[in-house]
Amino acid sequence: MERLYDTFVHAIMVKLEARLYVELECVYKDITNKIVEKKGKLTNEDVIEFQKKLQEVYDTNAAIREKVTGIKDSKKCIITKEACEELIKRFSVIYIKEDEQAKNDRVDSHL
C-alpha cells in the first residue's frame, strides 16, 4: 500500500514540475514579447511586473507541493476525503490553465 501511495505522490510531483515548466514558459514568452514590443527598453515597472509574475508562479507551485508532501508525510498512507477534494480542486485549476495555454498555442501557431 505504501509503495502504491508513494508512486501516486511521485506522479503528482511530476505533474507539478510539468505545470511549473509550462507557467514559466508563458512568463518567458510574455517577457520576450514585451522586450520586442518596447525595442529592448523595459521600464522599472515592467521588470517589477515580471518579477511578481515569476514569484506568483513559484509561490503557487510551492504551496501545492507543500500540500502534497504534507499529505505524504502524515505517515498514515491514507488519503482522506478532504485531502482528495483539495487535490482535485488544485488539479482542476492546473488543467484549466493547461487547456487555456493549449488554446493560446493553437491560436499563436495560426498567426
Image (cartoon, helix red, strand yellow):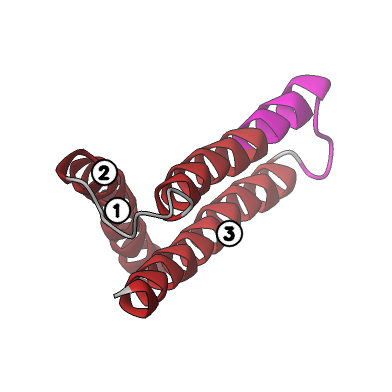
Q: Is residue 59 located in the magenta-colored stretch of the structure?
A: no
- The image quarter in which residue 12 lies: bottom left
Element under disc 1: helix
Q: State which tag comes first along the sequence, 3 or 1.
A: 3
Horizontal relation, residue 42 to residue 100: left or right:
right
Mark 1 and mark 3 in contact (Cβ < 8 Å)? no
Which residue range is magenta in the image? 39-53
Element under disc 3: helix
Identify which residue is drawn at 54% across, 56% down: 20
Identify which residue is drawn at 33% across, 58% down: 98
Distance, label 2 to label 3, CA atoms, is 29 Å
Local crowd size for mark 1, using a 10 Å CA cut-off: few (<14), some (14–19), many (≥20)? few
Distance, label 3 to label 1, CA atoms, is 14 Å
User: Whole-percent x and y of residue 72?
Assistant: 43, 55
The foreground one among 58 and 54 is 58
The residue beneath circle 3 is 25
Which one is closest to the eye, mark 1 or mark 2?
A: 2
Element under disc 2: helix
Is the residue 111 above or below the residue 56 in the image?
below
Mark 2 and mark 1 in contact (Cβ < 8 Å)? no
The residue beneath circle 1 is 100
